[in-house]
Image (tube, rainbow, N blue to C red):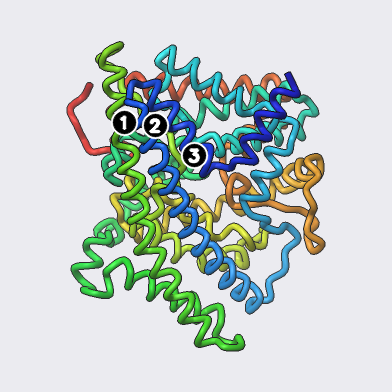
Amino acid sequence: MDAFLQGLKSVTDTLGPTVMLPIIIFIVAWVLGAKPGKAFRAGVTIGVAFIGINLVIGLMWTSLSDVAQAIVTNTGVQRDVVDVGWPSAAAIAFGSSVGLWVIPIAILVNILMLTTRLTKTLNVDIWNYWHFAFIGSLVVAATGSLLYGLIAAAIAAALALFLADWTAKAVQNFYGIPGISIPHLTSAPAVPIAIATDWVIEKIPGLRDINLDTETIRQKWGVFGEPVVLGLVIGLILGIIGYYNADQALVKILGTGMNLAAVMLLLPRMVQILMEGLIPVSEAAREFMQKRASDREIDIGLDSAILIGHPAAIASALVLVPIAIVLSIILPGNRVILFADLAVIPFVVAMMAPLLRGNVLRIIIAGTVTLGIGFYIATAMSGLFTETAIAANFQIPENATRITSIADGFLWPPALFVGLVELLGGFFGLLVVLALLALAMFFYMRNRTAWEVAAGAPKVEAE
């Protein structure tokens, strides 16, 4: 069995997400009843779209990482917990003892929940199963038990499906992408924090009346409110903050501005290509369920990369980059220095946009709260994070006593699992996590409409 799992993991790692996803989409669409030619074209189109999305995200990653390093150098801040980035966190997760088992476990959980009508999400985003393995590997480090780690990974997979179902209608309506959901544990965990932040903002006169969505910005600012120009302006400001005292400062500042303008323009275009590929899959899923269960829907679970191209999400995230660096300097007790993962901030805030109605100001406020809490979560969990990395043979940077990442290291799901396991022990801690998830699912399924509206879905008549 271990040899088979190792082979499956090796194939997945070797092919990578941009090759595996088209294959999975082709198989899923074919099984759901799409004609082979149509299923094949859908898979290839979606794969091409993700290649394009990843290329644009890579451009953003490089630009933001370079300017962030320059800003950190200018501030002279020193911390002993170093942000090593989500690729390192993913490598640690898949390289852990849980990583070998996570793909079959997550698939089994998804099948069981679909069969028992506990979810309507078919999670084809196999690469991002690493989030489940990451939580499981932290539990292994906390308890010394592989069994508890595997159980934790299974519960995390179920949690992702619940969060995807809860937010699906809001995401579909706001982003205009029907038939999808986002079981991504970097993005979905921000929704409860955004709900709480929005509730507080609604209690504050003046602040609650400010509507700074992208359409309002475009109307008030004219050409300067266009996404491409907005990206240019934000990029120039970030470039000035980072490179004002650098060699060839003007070249670097202008380059940053143009790169981020390109991101703002190209990401939505890549998502349009993705939607072209998703339409036949969604139609096949709808017809499949109508023939077998007319009252059921199936949503295809995808990476939140398809969301970050929205102007409200990306503009908010770019503004949050310098805010995150300032927070790392001023927060008392924080030990984390940001480095590699600042380009993950768009993923953290992408699912806030539907709930906060695209209001850039509210997304920035909720994002600031999320990051502020995240610094303390990351500081507290950095010991286990580092222990897990060492167990997975990850090379710790020379200047770091401990390591973390914004993706997962800053977020509440890993902290919830680890906190309860350390407080109550492996068995009872995981039992409480499972009970909390079951309770949330019970209340959600009892009144789906109210929960979905709370997460940003348009108001409709009660089911």
Q: Mark 1 or mark 3, which has the lower sequence index?
A: 3
**Residue 331, numbered circle:** none
Q: Amino acid at mark 2?
A: Ile
Cα gap from disc 2 to disc 1, whole angstroms: 7 Å
Where does residue 23 sit, x and y in percent of width and height?
Answer: 49, 33
**Residue 282, numbered circle:** 1
Camera-side residue of 35 and 417: 35
The residue sitting at 21% across, 73% down in the picture is: 222
Q: Quadrant of residue 77?
A: bottom right
Helix, strand, or loop for circle 3? loop
**Residue 300, numbered circle:** 2
Where does residue 26 sit, x and y in percent of width and height?
Answer: 43, 31
Camera-side residue of 264 and 336: 264
Q: Nearer the viewer, mark 1 or mark 3?
A: 1
The answer to whether residue 329 is left or right of residue 217 is: right
The residue sitting at 44% across, 13% down in the picture is: 115
Relative height, residue 146 to residue 352 (above, below)? above
The residue singled out by tag 3 in the image is 184
Asked if the residue under mark 1 is in contact with the one under mark 2, i.e. CB atoms within 8 Å, the reply is yes
Estimate how packed mark 2 is, as few (under 14), some (14 to 19) or many (20 or more) residues with alpha carbons within 10 Å: many
Helix, strand, or loop for circle 2? strand
Cα gap from disc 2 to disc 3, whole angstroms: 12 Å
Q: Mark 2 or mark 3, which has the lower sequence index?
A: 3
The answer to whether residue 150 is left or right of residue 180 is: right
Q: Amino acid at mark 3?
A: His
The answer to whether residue 252 is left or right of residue 102 is: left
Q: Nearer the viewer, mark 2 or mark 3?
A: 2
